[in-house]
Structure formats: C-alpha cells, structure tokens
Amino acid sequence: GAVVSQHPSRVICKSGTSVKIECRSLDFQATTMFWYRQFPKQSLMLMATSNEGSKATYEQGVEKDKFLINHASLTLSTLTVTSAHPEDSSFYICSASARMNTEAFFGQGTRLTVV
Amino acid sequence: GENVGLHLPTLSVQEGDNSIINCAYSNSASDYFIWYKQESGKGPQFIIDIRSNMDKRQGQRVTVLLNKTVKHLSLQIAATQPGDSAVYFCAEVNSGYALNFGKGTSLLVTP
C-alpha cells in the first residue's frame, strides 16, 4: 500500500520553543493532507486540513497561529507547534489520500513532549 | 497537561475466538467507512473499508457490516490472534476526504 512518512517520531522540546513535524507521501501525490492530535486512550481529533498551495482549514477550537501548517508541495506538509507549552504534549498524526473517498494512509505519528 | 478523558472500552477475547467490535457513526450522509487498527505508539493502519451501497464486505479474517438504518458498523475478526491486540477505530468519510473517528475499542487477546 501507499506510504506516508512522518518525522520525527519523537521530540522533546523546552517550553517556549517551536517544533516542526514533517509529513511526506512517498509514492503518491496528495493534494490534501490531514493533521490529527491524539491524547492517551482517546480517539484521533482532526486539527486541520492541509491543502497544497493554499491555506489550511482549521477545525473549531484549533488555534491557527499556534499550529502553523504549510503544504508546499504535493508530497509534503508540515505542522509547526509554535511557542510550545506542556499542554501541547500529545501524539500528532498526519494522513493523506490520493483521491477522494479512498482510504487514507497515516504516518507513524510524532510523540511531542514539552518540558 | 494532557486531557485524561474517558478510557476506551475494552473487549477481551481468548485466542482463537471470534471478535466483534461495534461502532456508531453520526452523519447519515456519509458514504464511505473505514476500520483502522492502531497499535501503541503508532499511526492507524487500514484494515478494511465499505461503501454505503453495500452492507457487508469481507477481507482476510475480517468482515465489516454496515447498517445504515441505525448508523452502525461492526468489525468481525475471525480466529482472533495475539497480534490482533490493538485499538480499533471506525472512521466515516466526510466531504470526500476528512475522516471522523469513532471513540475506539481496545481489543485484548488472551492466550
């Protein structure tokens, strides 16, 4: 199946710093990618939809200035957590679909810990 | 800190038995559904999908049933194995792309 690569898999950062997470579709072009956040023992919560060449669409309650999304090419989307705080510690996951109404492929996830 | 929230429901089955995991979805207009398996510390992995013009689809050891009348999905795993232990999520597709995930069920397979 198609592969989505997410990097880094784990990151620890100091409070107040920014962290960038990359999501790449390795063998298909993804005009749309998605970013999710997951707390322990909970489901995935959609944060934003990343569209190549345009601004991301954020879900209600997600701060766009806090979680910067850039989708510069058909195979790369990045999520930057700016001025990170301990409450931003979570598991962040990206996904991508090659076409509408087809399966979404997920990255391996990034465990962010803010200390 | 992180939200604690509610713990996932847990289904415990013995190795070799069949497992049935249930899911309710919210949007009656959704026309595509996917089951995912998520192991600890990893991203979700596709298991099987079904479109709304079907009520049953079978894969290798897995079957998905869709009941649109009551907006309910189920995932059946035959001859459950220890490697099946994971959290299982159903997801409904909205607007062609975005996935809305169900709450998830933790499957624990005991030898």
Image (cartoon, coloured by chain):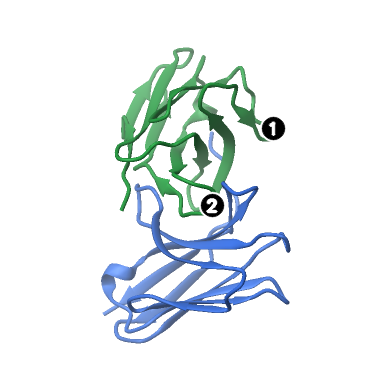
Chain colours: A green, B blue
Residue at image position (42%, 29%) is A74
Foreground residue, B1 or B64? B64
Query: Would residue A65 appear left or right of A73 to someone viewing this image?
Result: right
Q: Residue at x 42, y 69 (%)?
A: B107
A59 relative to B43, above or below: above
- What's the residue at 66%, 35% (across, down)? A59
x%, y% of residue A50?
Answer: 54, 30
Looking at the image, which is closer to me, A25 or A42?
A25
Residue A23 quadrant: top left
Picture coordinates of residue A37, whole percent (x, y): 51, 39
Name the foreground residue: B111 vs B46. Answer: B46
Q: Residue at x 45, y 41 (%)?
A: A96
Callouts 1 and 2 on one subunit: yes
Residue A93 placement (x, y as % from top left): 44, 40
Residue B54, x across and y down, in percent = 57, 75
Inspect the image, locate mark 1, and give the three-letter code of the amino acid beneath it: Gly
Which residue is at the far bottom? B17
Q: Secondary structure at mark 1?
A: loop
Label 2 sits on residue: A43
Rate crowding at label 1 as few (under 14), some (14 to 19) or many (20 or more) other CA atoms within 10 Å.
few
Q: Crowdedness of circle 2 by 10 Å Cα count: few (<14), some, many (20+)?
A: many
What is the number of callouts on the image?
2
Q: Secondary structure at mark 2?
A: loop
Q: Is residue B9 above or below residue B56?
A: above
Chain for disc number 1: A
Give how far apart the Cα atoms at labels 1 and 2 are: 17 Å
**Which of the 4 image quarters holds residue B65?**
bottom right
Q: Which residue is mark 1?
A: A61
Q: Chain of mark 2?
A: A
Q: Amino acid at mark 2?
A: Ser
- Image quadrant where one finds the C terminus of chain A: top left
Indicate which disc, 1 or 2, sits on the residue closer to the N terminus: 2
